[in-house]
């Protein structure tokens, strides 16, 4: 079972804060998207509709990210519960001007969901572990 996924974004002018670096809220959104991708990849053989974010933990901004940098996220499923998945995300920034560096890390917990007959989301027991496939 593949537990690692990749997700990338290019830092553009609308992503820059008044200090001339990537706005932290934008990085958080990208980390969330990277975690969603990893979760959906992990759950693709189940009946899960998708995931919702439960918690963001251990977010650490390590290096500034600049206009024109690529942000490349590597997301790994590190823990599973009945309906939850914990994803460890490492965001690397890279450009010719600033090189390749670890810019941010986070652990994000997601909950697998399905839609009921009314279209409302409810948690879904995915029955997956890191040691075996469903």
Image (tube, grey):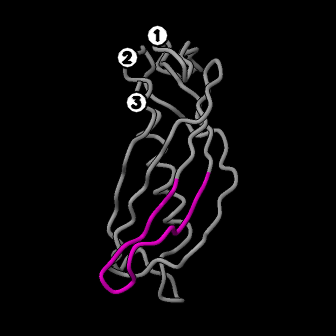
The residue positioned 48% from the left and 82% from the top of the image is: 21
- Total residue callouts: 3
Where does the image place residue 57, in percent across and percent down from the top left? 69, 50
Q: Which residue position is annotated with label 1?
A: 134
Q: Considering only vertical position in the picture, is 112 above or below 11? A: above
Q: Nearer the viewer, residue 78 or 11?
A: 78
Q: Which residue position is annotated with label 2?
A: 45
Instruction: Look at the numbered disc 1 and give the secondary structure of its residue.
Output: loop
Labelled pair 1, 2 in contact (Cβ < 8 Å): yes
Locate residue 61: give its quadrant. bottom right
The residue positioned 58% from the left and 40% from the top of the image is: 53
Q: Considering only vertical position in the picture, is 80 above or below 107? A: above
Q: CA distance from mark 1 to mark 3?
A: 13 Å
Q: What secondary structure predominates along the stretch shown in magenta? A: strand
Which class describes the residues within 10 Å of circle 1: few (<14), some (14-19), or many (20+)? few
Which class describes the residues within 10 Å of circle 2: few (<14), some (14-19), or many (20+)? few
Q: CA distance from mark 1 to mark 2?
A: 8 Å
Instruction: Look at the numbered disc 2 and give the secondary structure of its residue.
Output: loop
Nearest to N terminus: mark 1 or mark 3: 3
Q: CA distance from mark 3 to mark 2?
A: 12 Å
Instruction: Look at the numbered disc 3 and give the secondary structure of its residue.
Output: loop
Which class describes the residues within 10 Å of circle 3: few (<14), some (14-19), or many (20+)? few
The residue positioned 34% from the left and 62% from the top of the image is: 9
Quadrant where the N terminus sits is top left
* Residue range (magenta): 90-106
Where does the image place residue 93, in percent across and percent down from the top left? 42, 70
Labelled pair 1, 3 in contact (Cβ < 8 Å): no
Q: Considering only vertical position in the picture, is 77 above or below 59? A: above
Locate residue 28: give its quadrant. bottom right
Q: Which residue position is annotated with label 3?
A: 2
Where does the image place residue 121, in percent across and percent down from the top left? 53, 23
The residue positioned 37% from the left and 17% from the top of the image is: 45
């Amino acid at each position: 079972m593949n537990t690692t996924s990749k997700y990338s974004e290019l830092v553009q002018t609308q992503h820059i804060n008044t200090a001339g670096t990537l706005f932290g809220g934008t990085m958080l959104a990208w980390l969330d998207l990277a975690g969603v991708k990893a979760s959906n990849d992990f759950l693709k053989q189940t009946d899960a509709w998708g995931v919702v974010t439960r918690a963001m933990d251990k977010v650490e901004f390590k290096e500034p990210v600049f206009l024109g940098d690529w942000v490349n996220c590597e997301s790994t499923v590190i823990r599973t519960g009945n309906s939850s998945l914990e994803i460890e995300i490492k965001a690397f920034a890279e450009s010719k001007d600033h090189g390749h560096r670890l810019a941010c890390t986070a652990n994000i917990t997601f909950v697998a969901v399905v839609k009921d007959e009314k279209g409302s989301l409810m948690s879904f027991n995915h029955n997956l572990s890191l040691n075996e496939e469903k």
